[in-house]
Structures are given as C-alpha cells and as structure tokens.
Image (tube, coloured by chain):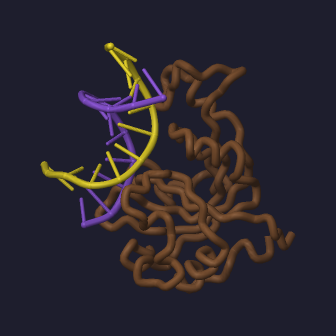
Chain colours: A brown, B yellow, C purple
Amino acid sequence: MKNSKRRYWLMKSEPHCFSIDDLKKRPKGTEPWDGVRNYQARNLLRDEVRCGDGVLFYHSNIKDPAVVGLARVVRSGYPDHTALDPRSEHFDPRATEAAPIWFMVDVQFLAKLPVPLTRGDLARHPTLSAMEVLRKGNRLSVQPVTLEQWRALIEVAGLGDPLEDL
DNA sequence: GCCAACGTTGGC
DNA sequence: GCCAACGTTGGC
C-alpha cells in the first residue's frame, strides 16, 4: 500500500508519564493514545488522524526535549473511555457514552531513533526548522508534520522509512 | 523554579 | 459576547 493519502503527525508525551520505551514494551508495541483533553487536538484525533499514518514520538517537558522514535497509527479515532471512568485521572464528568467528547487513536511502535533529535538539532536543519513543535508557545500535543519533514527527519536520524513497504 | 503562551472558566 | 482571573503546558 503505497498510500498517497498517508499523513504524518508529531505526538508529545512526557517520558516519565509514557515514553518511547514504554510503547515498545506494550503488547504488539501498541497503546491507545488516551487522555488528550484539548479540543484542537481532539478534533485532529477524531477527524484527521487515520490508520496507517506516521507518527513522530516526541518527549516533552524534560531537560532535552526531542523526537525519540517513530510509530504509526493502527486505529483511527474512537471514544476515549477514560473520560467515562471516575477512577481515571482523565475522567470528565461531562462525557457520556452517547456524547463521549474526547477521542483517541491507537499507536504502534516502529523504531527508536539511534540518537534523539533535540530542538537544537531540528532548528539547525533547513527543512526541520519549520516544524510546528519549535514554535514558541505551541502546546498542541498532536500536530501535523509534512511529508518533507518526515523524510528529512528519518534521513537525519540515519534510518530508512519503516512505512515504505507497509 | 521561572515565566511566556495559551486555553478555559465564569461574572457581568 | 467581553474579558479578567486562573490553570496548564512546556521550554529554558
């Protein structure tokens, strides 16, 4: 499936909460990307992010924030049931089965970068310097990445595109 | 730990 | 609907 409709995303996670290694260790390397509680990101997860899309895994809120791995979306948007669970830290009393409010996708581990690509690394690169994640004040935890950025990042990382023959 | 940027809440 | 107050994110 040389998928011309495939899109690419950057997803942020605080590694002490959920890291690229945590994702790798999951059964089938797959984990629901739950707990997103921002409407703009919700809209992306619900309407735009689709099965087969590529994901840059970004570690945020640490000493050296960086892109640390590659993943792919293996399930398109569906209701985030943690919003319905009063015991969950992501519980939202406004959410119901009929009107779930919040959505998530499933993400599967593809590869860890041999070396994390820090914000400095990205900023220095002619293509990657345009990435949204570098924009001051951008707090969106799911954000679009262009095909050019995806390719450039993989090249800089010294990897081949793991989605090439999927 | 600081603080800028941004989102949400709620009084009016 | 405006906007001040507040909470959160996240780089530095």
Give the quarter of the figure containing the N terminus of chain A.
Answer: bottom right
| Residue A83 picture location, percent across and down | 56, 28
Horizontally, is A149 left or right of A51 in the view? Answer: left
| Residue A120 picture location, percent across and down | 36, 77
Q: Height in image: A51 above or below A166?
A: above
| Residue A149 picture location, percent across and down | 59, 75
Q: Residue at x 53, y 62 (%)?
A: A57
Count how many numbered circles sit on residues in the image: 0
Q: Residue at x 43, y 60 (%)?
A: A59
Horizontally, is B8 left or right of A107 in the view? Answer: left
Give the quarter of the figure containing the C terminus of chain A.
Answer: bottom right
Q: Residue at x 60, y 42 (%)?
A: A42
| Residue A28 picture location, percent across and down | 68, 55
Q: Height in image: A116 above or below A30?
A: below
Q: Residue at x 41, y 78 (%)?
A: A123
Which residue is at the front of the view, A135 or A50?
A: A135
The quarter of the picture where residue A23 lies is: bottom right
Horizontally, is A164 left or right of A81 in the view? Answer: right
